[in-house]
Amino acid sequence: MAHAGPQAMHYHRPGNESVAGPAPASGAAMILPLLRSLVKVIVASLVVGTILAHFGITSEQLMREAGLSPDRIEELARQAVAWALPNVLLGSLVIVPVWLLLYLFRPPGHSSSE
């Protein structure tokens, strides 16, 4: 019996495909699924809110049961912004120049989706 040896692995993919599948045609094609999901969440929230209101359940009752108050939620939101903003600014000091260099030095005639 002859041993055929290891099979070669092919890493080359067509230009418009990645591991996740074909690349979207444009930036608008990337936004549409996000907008669809956002609309679904809004509609589902409206339906659930209507059902809860029908049974007399209010947001104030739910917050009280969870041990929250509007002031506490506001304080948590302020703490989140106070933590996130410096980190976003720090990260942008690295990301923005790298993106700018990549944008400036890409070959002429190539879009970012190629």
Image: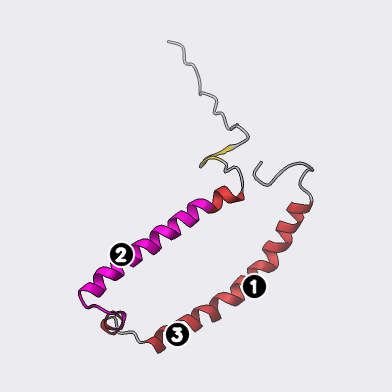
Determine whether the residue tagged by mark 1 lies in a helix, strand or loop.
helix
Gap in Å between the C-alphas at discs 2 and 1?
Answer: 38 Å
Residue 111 screen position, x and y as percent: 70, 44
Name the N-terminal-most of marks 3 and 2: 2
Which residue is found at the position 61% from the left and 46% from the top? 26
Residue holding disc 1: 89
Camera-side residue of 50 and 16: 50
Residue holding disc 3: 74
Residue holding disc 2: 47
Q: How is the image coloured?
A: secondary structure
Above or below — where is 28 with respect to 58? above
Circle 3 Cα neighbour tier, 10 Å, few/some/many (<14 / 14–19 / ≥20): few
- Name the residue type under label 1: Leu
Q: State the extent of the magenta-drawn residues as a range.
A: 32-60
Determine whether the residue tagged by mark 2 lies in a helix, strand or loop.
helix
Determine whether the residue tagged by mark 3 lies in a helix, strand or loop.
helix
Camera-side residue of 9 and 13: 13
Camera-side residue of 98 and 68: 68
Q: Quadrant of the C terminus?
A: top right
Gap in Å between the C-alphas at discs 3 and 2?
Answer: 26 Å
Q: Main secondary structure of the magenta part?
A: helix
Residue lying farthest to the top in this orientation: 1
